[in-house]
């Protein structure tokens, strides 16, 4: 059997499945208009998507809207195919949750939303298929790009500077500090002699400190000493009296030892930088930048999938 004949045979079976699955009357003629890597798009699919776009975008039905509907369906077929390659399937509970939210915004339930769409000649399956493709595509994009996109503090600073309204929200300038913490542990019932010995050991270590680069070497072999790197630490998160010492120390200095509830602590100040805006605004801005970069990567991936796909118009 030739490749074309095999496609025709496969297409006939898919038409039957479409007829049964969508509830179209068996007497209604349905034809395949596009094959996307052998995944069919019928004239019914295109008509349904065109109707849906007409009521959601207020665009007039016609050749331009039909092309837009067809292109969207092609993209969704490619998105679902890529999802299947990576083992992603749409979560039907999430689909129904999104439908429920849409309905609630229009003061309807899902059945009411289906009825409203039905009056415009749109089967709610059209909307469900759209949501399924979006959910799967989100999973695909996260899998492929989330670990490669890095949004740093400098990027956030630049975005806030370009958006004064956001950078002024919360107002104040905050300082973040890069620290190396050295802690000498103390038992909960430590006596004054033990505490004094730990303080003395901490002072000896501090006297040998020359830079952040040698903190780890200084602590090697020192009984009970542990080291922790604290990146972009806000001074407010450090307990007093260490907070005051860290705030006043210059970069490249180590603070005198202080007592905490868990031991004797020293801090090597390895860097300081001022940032604008409160923490919540900065976190929101970082998420926004991340989403924007993810969208750029998603568009590139979809463009590549289109270029590599076998798309046959009939």
Image: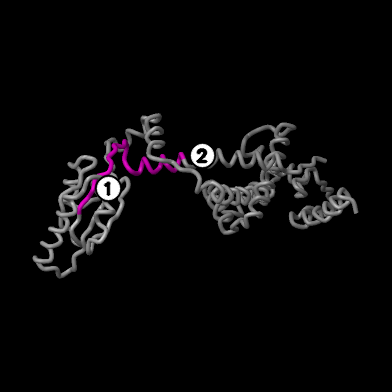
Of circles 2 and 1, which is in front?
Answer: 1
Question: Mark number for residue 267?
Answer: none
- Distance (Cα) linking label 2 and label 1: 30 Å
What secondary structure is marked by label 1? strand
Q: Are marks 2 and 1 in contact (CB under 8 Å)?
A: no
Give the mark, 2 or 1, whose residue is nearer the N terminus: 1
Provide residue 161's location: percent of width, then percent of height: 37, 30
x then y, percent, for residue 238: 23, 51
307 is higher (above) or lower (below) than 265:
above
Residue in view at x 82 percent, y 48 percent: 30
Mark 2 packing: few (<14 Cα in 10 Å), some, or many (20+)? some
x, y percent for residue 290? 47, 42
Identify which residue is drawn at 64% across, 41% down: 302
- Residue 78 in the figure: left or right of residue 219: right
Q: Secondary structure at mark 2?
A: helix
User: In this rendering, does residue 240 appear at all?
Assistant: yes
- Counting labels gives 2
Q: Which mark, by number, is residue 179?
A: 1
Q: Is residue 283 magenta?
A: yes
Q: Which residues fall within the magenta stretch? A: 266-289
Question: Which residue appears at 20% of the width and 52% of the height?
Answer: 266
The foreground one among 64 and 161 is 161
- Between residue 172 and residue 156, name the one nearer to us: 156
Q: Residue at x 28, y 53 (%)?
A: 216
Residue 191 sits in quarter: bottom left
Residue that badge 2 annotates: 293
């Amino acid at each position: 059997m030739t490749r074309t004949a095999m496609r025709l045979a496969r297409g006939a079976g898919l038409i039957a499945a479409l007829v049964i699955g969508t509830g179209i009357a068996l007497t209604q003629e349905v034809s395949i208009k596009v094959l996307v890597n052998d995944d069919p798009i019928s004239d019914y699919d295109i008509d349904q998507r065109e109707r849906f776009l007409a009521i959601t975008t207020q665009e007039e039905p016609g050749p331009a809207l039909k092309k837009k509907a067809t292109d969207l369906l092609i993209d969704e077929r490619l998105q679902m195919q890529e999802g299947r390659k990576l083992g992603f399937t749409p979560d039907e509970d999430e689909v129904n949750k999104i439908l429920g939210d849409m309905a609630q915004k229009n003061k309807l339930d899902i059945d009411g939303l289906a009825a409203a769409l039905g009056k415009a000649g749109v089967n709610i399956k059209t909307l469900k298929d759209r949501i399924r493709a979006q959910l799967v595509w989100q999973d695909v994009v996260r899998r492929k790009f989330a670990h490669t996109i890095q949004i740093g503090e400098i990027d956030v600073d630049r975005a806030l500077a370009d958006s004064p309204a956001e950078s002024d929200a919360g107002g104040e300038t905050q300082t973040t500090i890069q620290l190396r913490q050295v802690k000498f542990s103390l038992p909960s019932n430590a006596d004054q002699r033990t505490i004094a010995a730990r303080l003395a050991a901490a002072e000896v270590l501090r006297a040998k400190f020359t830079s952040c680069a040698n903190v780890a070497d200084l602590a090697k072999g020192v009984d009970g000493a542990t080291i922790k790197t604290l990146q972009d630490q806000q001074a407010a998160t450090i307990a007093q009296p260490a907070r005051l010492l860290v705030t006043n120390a210059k970069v490249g200095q180590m603070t005198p030892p202080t007592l905490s509830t868990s031991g004797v602590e020293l801090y090597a100040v390895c860097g300081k930088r001022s940032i604008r805006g409160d923490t919540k605004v900065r976190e929101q801005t970082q998420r926004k930048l991340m989403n924007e970069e993810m969208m750029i990567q998603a568009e590139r991936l979809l463009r590549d999938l289109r270029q590599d796909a076998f798309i046959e118009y009939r």
